[in-house]
Structures are given as structure tokens and as C-alpha cells.
Image (tube, rainbow, N blue to C red):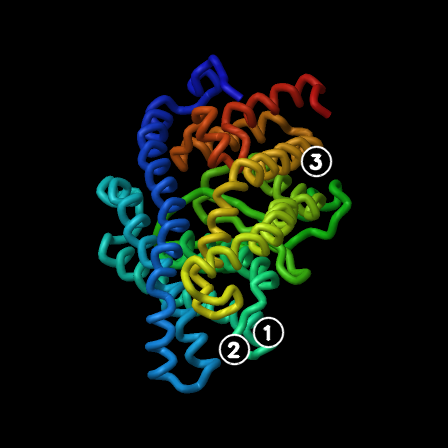
Amino acid sequence: MRHTEPPEAYGFDPQRQHAARRELRLTTALRTGDLVLSVTLPLLLAIGALPLYASISRLIRTSWLSALTFTWIVLAIIELPRPWILLLAHHRVLKEGSLRSSSWRLSLRSFATVPFLALAGTAIFSVPYWAADVPWQEASWGAAATLWYLYAMVRQWGWWWFPYGARHVRADVTVQERVKPLAKRAKVKPPRVVELDSDGQPIAMAAYVIWMGFDRILISKPLRELLTPEELDAILAHEVAHKCEALFMSLPLLIWIVTAAPALGFGLPRLAAVFGTAAQAIPALTLFIFLCEGIRLALLPITNAVSRWVERRADRRALRITANPEAFRTAMIKVYNFNRLDAAPSGWWQFLFGTHPTGIERVRSTVRSAKGEGR
């Protein structure tokens, strides 16, 4: 949705918005480059996959160990461009001193992240290898598709936090107590609040995460320090609202699985034949990754649209829980100003990359709530 009024008309800081628009151009270029590399690099690796796997098999006679070694090398090569993208993205903010970290320290952590994430992906892929008809020789790529999506989420969080050295500590008891009445009004059990403290990027953020029945609200230390108690309630209520509608948060995963299964079944055998390997052979891993990342890119507008819909629902529920639209409005403005987020990105950027409603849209929703609309 395009807005005729500038963000400043809604209370956003003009200087911060100018900086946000400048940084958005760099971020867009880097994200586009990241998507292109994610698709093309596996395809380029597929050219040398057979010789590489043959060499590893000669050096490592144990079949399961050679398969895991090959997997680790492939994933490490695919992850290797990301530290450079990360460093380039933060070159300006490092120079401006808005990171509490030196460039060499961030560089060291960035490149140390590559082998650890590749190891995580290898552990995930060991599951379909183990479950295959011929153990460690053939992979059930249909089952691996879901695991690859899970790895993609692990990778996203890994590149967000590992280089910055984020530490998880239980939030202050006063913050924990603020969640309880919000959860009571929402008629859910209050999730535990965990504070993220990092010596890297001091970003104001909050998120609701659930894993194997354990749920948490994650908040960063800068966010807690930035907001008044009433504004913090508004943000916490938004995360509590996600717990009320946790089923909707799985919609992007379900969309991806439904789409990936037939695409892999149709595309993998044909690509494998072109590259001279069997569709179920371990060297076809690079072709599998190419297809998975291609599907992710093709589905990005759809999954992001679903994400924005989920976030709008959480905003509306949070406004009902707190009944304080003014606190929600000022909290949004503070978060967008602090993080230098563009409150009115272009329509095509929002279509391709926007996972949340625009800042202006979220502020305008508080006006409708105050007038008793949109309930």
C-alpha cells in the first residue's frame, strides 16, 4: 500500500528516515545478491559434484563418513559468501560507531559461523541419509525438503545472532510480571521472556518463538531500555497475540512443503540426468539445494504476504489486549526510528521483501483502533 503522506507526517524522525532510505538501497542490493548467489552457487557446484564426491570416497572408505564429509563441504561453500555480504552491509554502521564491536571481531565471528552452520546442516541431512533404503548412499529428498526449510530458518537466525555474540538471559522479573496480565486477557498461558544482550548490533527487536512445545518471547536489551512500561506492554502484547494464533505462523512452512514436494519430484530427476548423476545419489545434493532455493525465491512474495497478514492480525489483537493505541503508536515510531527502518518502502520492495506491514500502516492502525474501527 502506497501512502501519499511522508513518514514525518506520522511522527517518524526525518533524519532517521533519510538514513533509513539510504540504507535500504544497500540492503536491497545485498539481499538481491544473496538470493542470486543462493540459487546459482549450488548449480555451479553441481558441475564438479561427481569428481568431488569421487575424490572424497577414495580418501574416506567408510561410505557414511564420506557422504557426511561431502555434505559439509557443499554447505560450507554455499555459506561462504554470506560473511562478505554481512561485512559489506555493516561497513557503514561500523564506521559510524553504531555497532558496539570492532570490524575485525565481527569479521572473525562471521567467518567462524560458516563451519558451524555447515555442521548444523550436515546433522540435519544425516536424517534422510540414515532413513534411506540404502543407508548413507541414497537420500530421501522428499523428506529432506522439510528439513532443508528448517535448516534455512536455523541459517537465518545463525547469521543474525552468531556473529554478534548474542547472549540469552532471563528477563528482569518486572518484565516477566508485565506479561502475566496480558496473557490473562488473551486467555493463554504466559510465555517466559528471554532478554538478548549482544556486544554486536544494538537492535531493538522482539519475537515470539516456539520449539517442541517450549515457547519464549525474545526481546533485546535496547528495546527494553528504549520503551516506557506502557509501550513495552504494547510490544509484549503483540508477541502474546502470536501465541494466540501460533497455527497461522506455520502457514509459510506448509505453503513451502506443498509446493516443494511436486517441484522436487518433477525437477530433480531431470536435472540429475543433465548432470550425469542419479537423482537419489549424494552428489545430487547440490541440485536439490538449487531447486529448494529456487522454490524459496519463487514463493517469497506469497510467504511474505502471508507473514504480513499474520502480523496485522497480531497488531489488531495486541490493540484489543492493551486497549492503549497511543502506546502502540509511540512504540512503533520509536522502534522504526531507533533501528533506522524505512516506514514507507516502495511497493515493489514491500511485495518482494516485506515481512511486516509498513511503519505508516501500523501507526494508522492505531488511529482506526482509537476510533473504534477495524475491530
Residue 156 drawn above or below residue 303: below
Instruction: Name the element at disc 2.
Output: loop
Neighbourhood count class around disc 2 (C-alpha, 10 Å): few under 14, some 14–19, many 20 upward = many
Q: Which amino acid does label 1 sit on?
A: Ala
Could one spot residue 174 in this view of the protein? no
Q: What residue type is labelled 3?
A: Ile
Mark 2 belongs to which amino acid? Trp
Q: Residue at x 40, y 75 (%)?
A: 69
**Which of the numbered marks, if any, corresponds to residue 14?**
none
**Mark 2 — residue?**
136
Whether label 1 touches label 2, CB < 8 Å: yes
Closer to us: 175 or 150: 150
Q: Which of marks 3 and 1 is nearer the N terminus?
A: 1
- Tag 3 near tag 1, CB within 8 Å: no
Q: In the rendering, which numbered label is found on residue 132?
A: 1
In the displayed structure, 230 sits above or below 240; it is: above
Q: Where is residue 169 in the image (x, y as percent from the top left)?
A: 50, 60
Residue at coordinates 70% horizontally, 44% vertically from top-left?
245
The residue at which mark 3 appears reads as: 321
Q: Which residue lies furthest to the bottom in this view?
A: 61
Q: In this view, does 20 lie to the left or right of 363?
A: left
Compute the Cα span from label 1 to label 2: 7 Å
- Where 200 sits versus 316, above or below? below
Quadrant where the image shows the C terminus:
top right
| Mark 2–mark 3 distance (CA, rounded to whole Å) | 52 Å
* Mark 3: few/some/many CA within 10 Å (<14, 14-19, 20+): many
Whether residue 205 is visible? yes
Q: Which of 300 and 108 is in front in this view?
A: 300
**x and y percent of residue 13 in the render?**
39, 24
104 relative to 270 in the view: left or right? left
